[in-house]
Amino acid sequence: MNKIAFYKIICTVLLALTGNFVFGQIDKNATIETKALYKNLKDISKRSILFAHQHDTEYGHGWSGDVNRSDVKSVTGSFPAMVGVDFNGLSGKSAVDIELTKQALIKNVVDTYNRGGVTTAAWHFSNPASEGGFYWKDGVSVASMSLIKPGGSKHEEYKQILNTIADFAHSVKGKDGSLAPIIFRPYHEFDGDWFWWGKPYTSREDFIAVWQFTVSYLRDSLGVHNFIYAFSPDNKFNMEAEYLERFPGNDYVDMVGMDNYGDYGRDGHYDIETAIKKLKIVSDYGIKNNKLAALTETGLESIPNPTWWTETLLPILKSEKMELCYVLVWRNDIQSPTHYYAPFPGQISVPDFIKFYNDPFTLFEKDIKNIYK
């Protein structure tokens, strides 16, 4: 055997043994389906992007709880490729209400998995040390990150909350008998001042300590191996160093992302150049470090711009050879006549959204096959 042939054999063996690390995945014991999803999302990001919608199948514009319904599906004939859920109801409520929330979430995630779609979970985490929910409220809220970190007065309570999340993660078993992978996105928009874990109320050290403990406890102590962990600040950065100011390290993050509404038309403010610049910082970091990257939240409330999809969002996503695995737009509220981010039948941007749907660059659930293999 010559040296070249021997070298190829060694490389093949090493890739087989460490394939998850080649792609920057942090859990060496991740389930087969989670490893496959990670690799496939990385591959997809090189040529296209998944479209995601928050709470897409739970409710929509003027409806709630309808079986097999989705505003996106009503417009295009397909569910989005990725459905957003929220872990908000898994703490801060009675045991009965938490169980009801958990069972509804399980069904949602399993249904999406069985259809071949993907789930991403945000966490609007109700403050465990004060009233006021997940938002910061002056005079009411407590800066709790220092309390839930290891050694803090609320640390044991935090562990119990994570136990509930782990129990949920162990319960999302599809019809093939496998656990559904979930992209878990905790403590999002931490660079803002609206959440109790926001930058004004939390030191860099405490934020990183809580993040690292959260990942380690779920993965290593509780055996959750179907999570992909996503890091997503808001858009308050202009360079990589600012983006990484509270980054917990490559050993604790699978996916880098950002939330950005402000540059995409909110309050009439369009700054396409800045939107591209910031998103490229995220994409470049993912490419350099073999991490997934995504535009984890965006959208234009009420979508008053009838060509927003193909003349604002799509050109940004296609620019600068960025590698992004998904873009998520926010929810469609049940009752509000104006709080929606995806079109529904009759909404002014429907014709443009269909063009967006038909563009080969965007992938919906009908377009993805065997993403877990």
Image: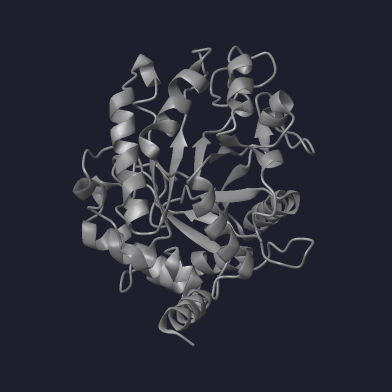
Residue 137 visible in the picture: no
How many numbered badges does the structure rendering display?
0
Q: Looking at this rendering, what residue extends furthest in the front direction?
A: 2
- Measured as percent of width and height from the top left, residue 145 is found at 32, 59
Q: What residue is at 52 percent from the left and 33 percent from the top?
A: 330
Task: Determine whether 131 is above or below 165 in the image.
Answer: above
Task: Determine whether 281 is above or below 147 in the image.
Answer: above
- Measured as percent of width and height from the top left, residue 229 is found at 46, 59
Q: Is residue 129 left or right of residue 370?
A: left
Quarter holding residue 271: top left
Q: Is residue 188 left or right of residue 36?
A: left
Q: State the colouring used for the structure image.
A: one colour
Q: Nearer the viewer, residue 141 or 289?
A: 289
Residue 240 visible in the picture: yes
Task: Determine whether 22 is above or below 136 in the image.
Answer: below
- Measured as percent of width and height from the top left, residue 183 is found at 53, 54
- Measured as percent of width and height from the top left, residue 241 is found at 19, 49
Q: Nearer the viewer, residue 200 or 181?
A: 181
Task: Determine whether 105 is above or below 212 in the image.
Answer: above
Q: What residue is at 50 percent from the left and 55 percent from the top?
A: 184
Q: Nearer the viewer, residue 18 or 91?
A: 18
Q: What residue is at 29 percent from the left and 39 percent from the top?
A: 138
- The quarter of the rendered structure image containing the C terminus is bottom right
Q: Looking at this rendering, what residue extends furthest in the bottom direction?
A: 1
